[in-house]
Image: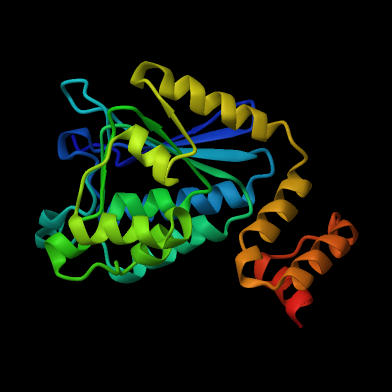
Amino acid sequence: MSETPLLFEKRDDGIAILTLNRPTKLNTLTASLFTALDEAVDRIAADPDIRVFMICGTARPDGRPCFSAGVDVSAYADDDGVTEAQGFDLTNKIDDLLKPSIAVIDGICTTGAGEIALACDFRLVGRGAQISDWHLKKLGTGLGAWGASTRWARECGVTNAKQMLLTGRVIDGDEAFRIGFAQAVFDSDALASGALEMASQIAGMNPKGIKLVLAHLDRIDDMSRDQALRWAQLSADWLDVKVGQAELKGKILG
């Protein structure tokens, strides 16, 4: 019997948990898994009872933690390889979603898996995590078809992005925290509870207010100071208006 590539848990406290579930394959990414992820993100977006969601990975069969070893190259032979469009569209969908997302990372997290993590609002990591980006090392280009170089630079700074991409180094949880990839680092046995605690704090906030804060902060680097201040000044008028992030940006910049 084949594995269910993605587990979806909707809790009663407003938290959803998505678990990459290919433990015998290091939770590597296939087209089938991406289709399931895409459908899950759409479900989260449409469900008002879900306030925040987490993405994590099933442990290996021997119990060692694992987020994901990136794209499953062998899946292309079975017509189940992730396409460039799938990866680009899904990471942008996660990035643009006005519901907070938390990547919960322990064990291996490399290349395409890192791009999924970087698309999330937060990354919480285990101290023994093994985080890397091997686009340049393995493929000869360090840009990443889903936006790797852009998100590494925006989240961790240009110099740290250069070091990650140009050297292919593997960093642990403490170093991930130091360079800004992670917002918190935990011992492995405390990671899940730490992530749930953060998710619970977010789930207890006003969801309309969360939507406005995310829409503002996700685009604040693209605005001038005056545009950002004007957005904040007008935002109270939109608390009861269901608009997308692009429309909010257009109201300010237009």
Which residue in the rendered view is the most extreme toward the bottom? 254
Quadrant hosting residue 157: bottom left
Query: Would residue 33 be visible to someone looking at this image?
Result: no
| Residue 33: percent from left, percent from top | 31, 50
Relative to 60, say whether 221 is above or below.
Answer: below
- Residue 235 pos. (x, y %): 84, 60
Where residue 114 appears, x then y in whole percent?
33, 50
Q: Residue at x 29, y 36 (%)?
A: 21
Q: Nearer the viewer, residue 142 or 251?
A: 142
Looking at the image, which is closer to me, 131 or 67? 131
What is the quadrant of residue 60 in the picture? top left
Quadrant of the image containing the N terminus: top left
Would you say residue 252 is visible in this rendering?
yes
Residue found at x 76% / y 83%: 254
Say if 167 sits above or below 177 in the image: below
Q: Residue at x 55, y 49 (%)?
A: 43
